[in-house]
Amino acid sequence: MTDMNILLVSSLESFLQLIGVLLIFVVVLFVTYFATRWMAGYQKAHTYNKNLRIIDTIRIGTNKLVCIIQAGRKYLVVGIGKEEIRLLGELAEDELRDLSFLDESQPEILPESFQEMLKKFKDKIPKK
């Protein structure tokens, strides 16, 4: 065989190996996707409870949450930490408010603008 033929055969083998690896990758990706979907459905079906429901959750730190949980007809406010859960209080149903209409992308309007606060800060800096 000539050098050209050896090079051509070597390139063809490398290309076929690349196609094989890509095909295996795609198969693994599909299997992972469907296994994840199946597990999510399985967990959702097995964690359904008629007496407990999480109403709302807010993150207040890296490993800290505050949750409102409906337990039967009671509404409990619970603090969840990395290794503990504490009852913070109880709420009546009429104390709950729906705040989903607030647009979280817009910041709340502050009494004074950032420019005004910056101006006050600049005024306090001693001038040379």
Image (cartoon, rainbow, N blue to C red):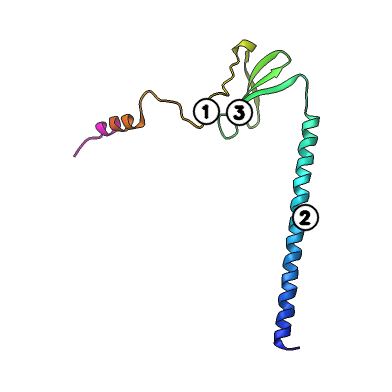
Residue 92, visible in the rendered structure: no
Q: Amino acid at mark 2?
A: Val
The foreground one among 23 and 75 is 23
Number of marks present in the image shown: 3
* Contact between labelled residues 2 and 1, with CB atoms less than 8 Å apart: no
The local secondary structure at tag 1 comes to loop
The foreground one among 79 and 46 is 46
Tell me the crowding category of disc 2: few under 14, some 14 to 19, or many 20 or more residues within 10 angstroms, Cα based. few
The residue mark sitting in front, 3 or 1, is 1
Estimate the spatial distance between the alpha carbons at disc 1 and disc 2, rounded to whole Å.
Answer: 41 Å
Q: Which mark is residue 27?
A: 2
In the picture, the quarter occupied by the N terminus is bottom right
Find the magenta span and give its range: 121-128
The local secondary structure at tag 3 comes to strand
Mark 3 / mark 1, whichever is N-terminal: 3
Q: Amino acid at mark 1?
A: Asp
Check disc 1 and report the residue beneath it.
103
